[in-house]
Image: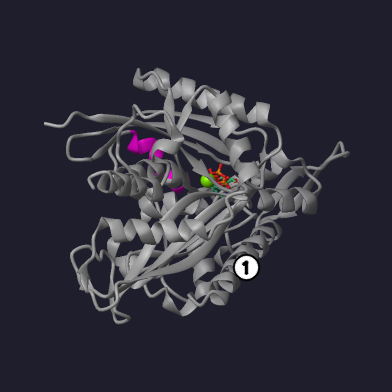
Amino acid sequence: MKKNSILVSIDVGTSKTTALVGDFDEVGELNIVGLGISETEGIEKGTIINPNSVVKSIKKALKDAEKVSGVGINSAVVNLSGPNLEYQNISESLTFGTNQKEIDEVDIALLIEKVEEKINKDQYKIIHIIPKRYILDDENEVLDPKGFIASKIVGEFHVILIKNNSYINFKRVIEASGVNVLNFVVNPVASAMATLYQEEKDMGVLLLDIGGGTTDIAVLKDSSFEFVGNIPIGGNRITLDIAHRFRIPKEEAEELKLEYGLATVDALIEDMEIEINQIGSEDTATISQYELVDTIEARLEEIFSLVKKEIEAVGFLDKINGGVVITGGVANTPYIKELAYRVFNTDVRIGKPKDYRGFSDRLNSPEFSTSIGILLFKRNYFSLKTNSTSLEKESDILNIFKTLVEKIKSLF
Ligand SMILES: Nc1ncnc2c1ncn2[C@@H]1O[C@H](COP(=O)(O)OP(=O)(O)OP(=O)(O)O)[C@@H](O)[C@H]1O
Ligand SMILES: [Mg+2]
């Protein structure tokens, strides 16, 4: 019988850093056995502005996760996010002429190698090459072409890249916290793994992870990622809007938002007065809840409209028959479903992480979708081996196939 595998995820968010210790049993079921959550300092809009503060936040989350689980942590799978990620759709083909052949791993590896050749490696590091579909002899679309006979294969891939400098800087911050990075997983991919049902992924779904600093976007259809993106606006922007409008400190704005905030004024049954302490004034002032909610609604509506425009531009707006799923901390805003429905005009639900056990009283909330999703992604797409400390050894799908090709090549 296979042994259990312990695996750690780190989600360095703009608001909080989460470290989870996952225990995968012999059939791959995930049990969370430890967690550490710290407030993140030093990140704005998904970009590191103070590396030392970020290191401190990660160290604190790791220390707590070690204490709770009793597991010493020296390696982890880590999220990647922010405006420095880029996304490309790339197609490549192989033609076998009149010699039809059975498609195998080597063909897929060759297609992926061709995709890799198209990327400027002086500028970018490839994070994921996610196969979308394969087309055989220009007519049959399949998700897994292995074993089919064809004279031509086209592979369509979704490629996720990050600028080399951002990659190196972020990796250094993680390593300075005392952990080796096993793999990176980008936020929208992780959150999609944790929240979406198979039916939604088949029908076409728009996933939004609205966090503190960024809104991550993923569109899936026919079970594959069609589009992944990111808008550098999140809940912290809403807090700042409140702080500016009512001239109050950020901390007070955040408190007001959490206590009295709603996503839309349509949900206000009756208005009420709220006392505030304005900057530079000794006396308390009052605002109406309507004004507060109106401020939140304006910014949320802007986020939804920007997302809508972006997915319309790439041609997916009319393909999300499975609806919209909202996750991330901002998904906790009461009536956000109703507001999103008004903009997207399709089913909307709040996505919480699923497919795990342990600490669910704490983790059963939208802000933990990325953390849980990182572990699930690792289980589904990479080997669960945790003794590998070199990122280059098994950093992405590409390298797994490359190793395969090398193995097969060395047989001849
Ligand atoms: N009940 C709530 N109502 C409204 N907003 C909330 C609520 N709970 C959390 N938030 C907001 O969610 C945001 C934090 O979300 P989350 O923890 O997902 O962010 P993060 O992962 O740290 O950041 P990011 O992914 O953007 O880098 C904050 O802006 C916070 O104010
Ligand atoms: Mg997040």
Residue for point 54% across, 60% down: 87
Main secondary structure found in the magenta portion:
helix
Disc 1, SS: helix
Q: Against 305, is 195 above or below?
A: above
**Image coords of residue 330 (percent x, y):** 54, 52
Indicate the quadrant where residue 253 lies.
top right
**In front: 6, or 66?**
6
For residue 148, side relative to residue 236 (left or right): left
Residue for point 40% across, 36% down: 393
Q: Looking at this rendering, what residue extends furthest in the left direction?
A: 1
**In front: 61, or 359?**
61
**In front: 9, or 275?**
9
Q: Amino acid at mark 1?
A: Leu
**In front: 110, or 26?**
110
- What is the span of residues highlighted in magenta in the rendered image? 359-368
> Which residue position holds label 1?
306
